[in-house]
Every structure is written in C-alpha cells, then in structure tokens.
Amino acid sequence: MNQYCFGVDLGGTTVKIGLFDPQGSVLEKWEIPTRTDDNGNNILPDIAAAILGKMQEMGITKDSVIGVGIGVPGPVDDDGVIHKAVNLGWGVMNINEVLGGLLQMPVKAGNDANVAALGEMWCGGGKGYNNMVLATLGTGVGGGIIVNGKMITGATGAGGEIGHIHIVDDEPDTCGCGNHGCLEQYGSATGVVRLASRKLAACDDASVLREAQANGELSAKAVFDAVKAGDQLACEVAEEFGMYLGKGLAAIACVVNPEIFVLGGGVSKAGEILCEYVSKYYKKYVFHGCRDAKFALATLGNDAGIYGAAKLVLE
Amino acid sequence: MNQYCFGVDLGGTTVKIGLFDPQGSVLEKWEIPTRTDDNGNNILPDIAAAILGKMQEMGITKDSVIGVGIGVPGPVDDDGVIHKAVNLGWGVMNINEVLGGLLQMPVKAGNDANVAALGEMWCGGGKGYNNMVLATLGTGVGGGIIVNGKMITGATGAGGEIGHIHIVDDEPDTCGCGNHGCLEQYGSATGVVRLASRKLAACDDASVLREAQANGELSAKAVFDAVKAGDQLACEVAEEFGMYLGKGLAAIACVVNPEIFVLGGGVSKAGEILCEYVSKYYKKYVFHGCRDAKFALATLGNDAGIYGAAKLVLE
C-alpha cells in the first residue's frame, strides 16, 4: 500500500498544503485562503476540509496517511500548544488535538521558521546533513536549529529566534521586539537598507545606490545588484552586512556547532556572493573547532514550510 | 537484582570515579592518578583495573552494571571518538570501543564540560529541568547545553563552547583560542581580574582591591568579597562582568531557549549575588520570549563530572 503525508504551511493570508510520499516527493500542492475573521475559528476546519477533500478526490484512505504536519506563525511547544498567534486571532490552543480531532489522523504542529529548517534539511540546501542552522533573511531574520535531525523548539517555543541575538550596543532604532541592536536590524532585507542608507548619509561617494534611494528603490536586491556591478559603496555595505551576520552565526556555532548554515529568505536571492560575504566574517569570529562549517543557499523557497511540515510527522 | 553504573571524570592529573545506583545516589567515590607518560597509553587500562577491582571488592557482577560513562577533556563525537586530547597525550581514539573492550561492559564517552552539565541536570542545580545551560566560570568559561534531557555534542564536538562567543570588538589581549574578545576573556575568574585591573588602572578611586592588587591577591574571590563589603569600584567591576555574561547567555537563549541557566566553576562560589548580576543584564539583552529563564548555582562542585558520566549510560 502506498503511504502519504500532508504538510501544511499556515500563513497570515494563505495556507499552503502539500501531499507528499515518505521519500520527499511532492505529489500535489495547492493553496487556500486563511480566514482570520471570527478569531481565526475557521482556519483549522478549512484546512481539515481541504485535506479530506483532496483525499476523497484522489482515493486516499486514512490508514495510508502517516499524518499531517503543520507549521504556524508563532511559538509552539513540543506538545503542539501554541500560546498566541496575533496574526491569526488565536489564543492558547493545542493544534495537535484540535486539528487531529477534526481529521481523525495524527497531527504534529511546529513553529513555521523551525519547520522550514526541517524542510531544507530534508529536501533542500541542507540535504544530507543532520546538524543544520537555517537563517531566513527576509523582512526580519528568522531561524531554525536542527540537532541530530530534530528541531530545537526550546522551553517556551523561542528556540531559533536568532534574529534577536544582541549584536550592537548603541543602536538608536528600536527592533520589532522592543530591544535595540538585534541581529535582524542589520542582517535582514530591512537591515541591508538601513546599513546602505546610513552609509549614503555619512559620505558623498558616488554610488548607483544614490539614484535608487532618490527613486524610492533602495532595497536589498538593489544593493547586491550594485555589488555585482562593482559599486564601491555597495561593496562596503555588503562587508558590513556580512560582518554582522558572520558574528551572529559564529555565536550560534559556539552553542550548537552545526555542520552547515543554510541561508534563505529574500536576501538569499543575491546568490553565492551572499555566502562569501557571511562566511568570511564567520571564519574570523568563530571558535576554531567550528571553522569548517559549510555555507549553502536554501533551495526550496516558499515551499520549505510544506516540506518541513510533512517531515514533522515522519520523525 | 541491584543495578549499578560507574561515572568517570578524567582530568589531566587525577581520575575521579564514582559508583552510582540508577537513581543518582553515589555509593562509592575515589580517585586514581592520571598517568600521562607514554602518550597516555596507561590511562584507560588504569581506569579499567580500578573499576574491575572495585567490582570484585564489592561483589558486583558485570550483568548488574548498566555501563560506564566517562567525561574527557577534549571534543568527543556521538560515537565516542576523541580527536585529540593534548593534556593526555592522546591522538584519535574511540574511547567507547577501547575502554569497552578492556571492561567488556558498555562504555559511553563525552566531553567533560558537556558531561558536567548532564550531572547538574540529573542531581544538581538543574534538577527537575530538561532544557538547561551550564556555564562553568573557572579559569576559562566552559559550557554544556542540554536539550530535551540530552547533551548537544555538535558536528565536531564543539557544542557548548560558549566561552568563545565573540563579545567585544576591540580587545587587545589574545584569548587562549587565538581570537580576541571572547566571552571567557571577561566572564571567567581570569576575566574578573582583567576587568578589575583595567578599572584600577583607569581611575584613582579608593578601593580595597588596590591593596589586594599590591599584595598579588587580586582574584575573582577578592572582587566578590569586596562587592559584599560594599566597595564601590568592585561593584562596578561586577556590573561589567554581569553585562558581558548577560549578553553571552542572552545570545545562547536565542538559539536553544533553555528553562534554566546553571552557573558553576570557581567564580560561582561568590553565591547568589552572581546570579543577580548576570540575570539583570540577561533580562536586558535577551529576546522577550526567553526572559523568564531561571538562574541557579551549580551544587555538585567537582563531582558534577562523575554524576554526568554515570547519567550518560542511563540515557
């Protein structure tokens, strides 16, 4: 009998769902809207209906489904309890029990950033490794820590919150978390723009980034495009960005000593050059016993969440 | 039938050995010298002879021994392979196999700092917790990370090398690891003395520490004794020390989000006041989701290693 598992990536506007075989091939992939009205009470029933509908459509029986994994945007403990998900309107809820009750199949929930790391380990940039750190460089810096093939959830579901490692002492801007000087204030897409804006303001050097800024088009992409075109000021911004991220990842290495760092999120579209800037400073700051860690780009893009969620139930 | 396990703490000059029951009571505890001559070839045979001798003396049979755990001063991977232990004269060796062959009983080896953390979790300052970080503040800063009751060894045995988290950018002194600005340059016993010496040199304020320094008695103990006596300069040193350690432990929390930090090593003899200085700055720098982590002092002292080694074989 064929066996299957489902991976669900629950976002604030869309739910992505994937049907997988246990070897990591995606057989079907589709999306439904996330209905956040009525305190998000429709979200899990909608997901259950979508999965049960797909099973009926494809003639898949419950006893051939190993389980349903789900990544959610908030801290989730090892029992599947989410303590709050503001984006979804949820309070405290045991997702494993509620969705499992609706589906009458095993359900396992995890934090979306951690689950994405599991996906990249299973079928993406970290394939073949058991000890991996995913750093997702998007609007913020998210993270997922995998040790011996398992996600580190942490005591309160805040394992892998690497974007909030304190890096700079005298930062005037406030981070989304309320602190000052967090890694994500420099190592994210927003952070690249912050570093570039400050450098542009601090000097008169010519740079294609001045025009981009004047046109309201200063972005992480614009900076790394300028780096590739040899723009000196952009290169200095990339060095600074690499220095902050290298320091942060070096601190992580002194804790969990991974085999590989996988860099994902929007900023990672810059390509291999990103790994070069980050690993240069990583090697400078890290303990010698961790110096040989590899760097790779994430490869699953927005699908990392459904892959990782499916892998959750295969553990 | 009664069951037993042995815990061995292999140091550069002495081997400590403990006989335990599976509930964590130590039944016998003794020491033998570490013979590091002849490339350390006698060390494991000496340990085997000591254990087998004790078993004969007490009428303990092999089938009642669950196993022998051993903590060693160097990086050890999950299979028990040590890659180098300069202090012992060892090159690459599979300790589980070699000592297991001599004893004809199950053997499990781990790094001494990681194993001490396991001991403090089992029967010491971290008892009752499954997610714990031990920071050993001695000559250097060692660490052990416990996640879901298990030690994090890391890809190359460098998991928990928290003393080498980069904390300060412009440190002129070189750390033992070759880098500059590592946590252990400020958060260790040596680090407290460094901070105190610099403060004494930078000002003319009266302090009992000036006399201690003149007498060659400036130590971490002298600093914390002076703090308790209300010495203003010593209090400023303790604040600075707490700030560096608080920052370092906050970075660790953003990775593994422990329930509790246990502070051990010589500096921890300062008592509860140490936890106060460190947790004050920890709370300042850490991600809000990790802010409620507890702080406690290690309680097993030099016995943490034998406790943790015994626990290794009970996992």
Image: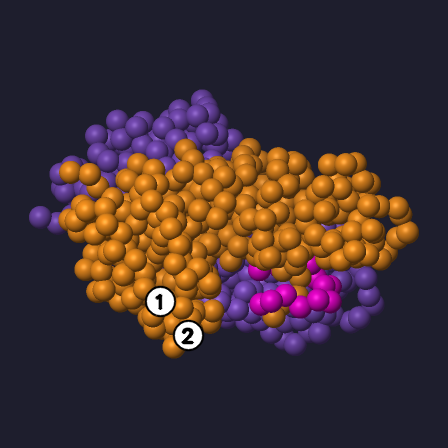
Chain colours: A orange, B purple
Residue B284 lies in the magenta-colored region: no
Q: CA distance from mark 1 to mark 2?
A: 9 Å
Residue ID at (44%, 42%): A120
Residue ID at (84%, 57%): A201
User: Residue B34 is drawn in which quadrant?
Assistant: top left
Q: Nearer the viewer, residue B78 or B291?
A: B291
Q: Is residue A170 left or right of residue A63?
A: right
Count neighbours of disc 2 (C-alpha within 10 A) and say few if under 14, some if 14 to 19, many if 20 or more.
few
Q: Is residue B156 left or right of residue A195?
A: left
Mark 2 element type: loop
Magenta-tinted stretch: A164-177
Measured as percent of width and height from the top left, residue B227 is found at 63, 71
Measured as percent of width and height from the top left, residue A155 is found at 40, 62
What is the total number of numbered labels drawn onto the structure image? 2
Kind of residue sitting beneath label 2:
Asp
- Residue at numbered disc 1: A43
Q: To which chain does the residue with label 1 belong?
A: A
Residue ID at (51%, 52%): A143
Mark 1 element type: helix
Q: Main secondary structure of the magenta part?
A: loop
Residue ID at (82%, 65%): B203
Does residue B119 appear in this view? Answer: no
Q: Is residue B132 left or right of residue A136?
A: left
Measured as percent of width and height from the top left, residue A44 is found at 32, 65
- Residue at numbered disc 2: A37
User: Which numbered disc flags the more N-terminal residue, 1 or 2?
Assistant: 2
Identify the residue at the far front of this view: A57
Measured as percent of width and height from the top left, residue B87 is found at 50, 33
Kind of residue sitting beneath label 1:
Ile
Count neighbours of disc 1 (C-alpha within 10 A) and say few if under 14, some if 14 to 19, many if 20 or more.
many
Q: To which chain does the residue with label 2 belong?
A: A
User: Residue A193 is drawn in which quadrant?
Assistant: bottom right
